[in-house]
Image (cartoon, rainbow, N blue to C red):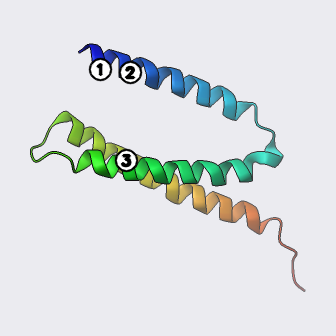
Amino acid sequence: MEGLISALFVFVLASFAGFEIINKVPPTLHTPLMSGSNAISGISLIGALLVASSTENLTLATILGFIAVIAATVNVVGGFLVTDRMLEMFKKKEG
């Protein structure tokens, strides 16, 4: 139980710090920041896959790992779509 509370505390602090950092980024840096966060989300996806597949029976870790796989996948795909759309705005129009 103590490990869960400590992990939850770290998660809340990381969420708060991430929110504050992202809000301070100027709009011109959003595309490079999105590319970097896509790479980090890819690493998170690999970690979530390892957690989800590490046990034979259905436990809390497996369920949370599966939820993490879904969330990280949505984040990676959505991030690449947004990055691609933003980069399209900087290309010169032909015609």
First in sequence, mark 1 or 3: give its number. Answer: 1
**Quick one: quadrant of the C terminus?**
bottom right
Q: How far apart, in angstroms, are the residues tagged by discs 2 and 3?
A: 18 Å
Q: Residue at x 88, y 75 (%)?
A: 92
Dot 1, crowdedness within 10 Å: few (<14), some or many (≥20)?
few
Q: Which residue is drawn at 68% across and 35% down?
A: 22
Q: Position of residue 72 (x, y in %)?
A: 44, 49
Q: Mark 2 points at which residue?
A: 8
Circles 2 and 1 in contact, beta carbons < 8 Å: yes
Q: Residue at x 37, y 22 (%)?
A: 7
Mark number for residue 47?
3
Q: How far apart, in angstroms, are the residues tagged by discs 1 and 3?
A: 18 Å
- Compared with residue 95, is residue 24 higher up or lower down, i.e. above or below? above
Dot 2, crowdedness within 10 Å: few (<14), some or many (≥20)?
few
Q: How many marks?
A: 3
Q: On the picture, is 5 further left or further right than 12?
A: left
Residue at the extreme top: 2
Q: Where is residue 85 in the image (x, y as percent from the top left)?
A: 69, 64
Q: Name the residue under label 1.
A: 4
Circles 1 and 3 in contact, beta carbons < 8 Å: no
Q: What is the secondary structure assignment of the residue under circle 1? A: helix
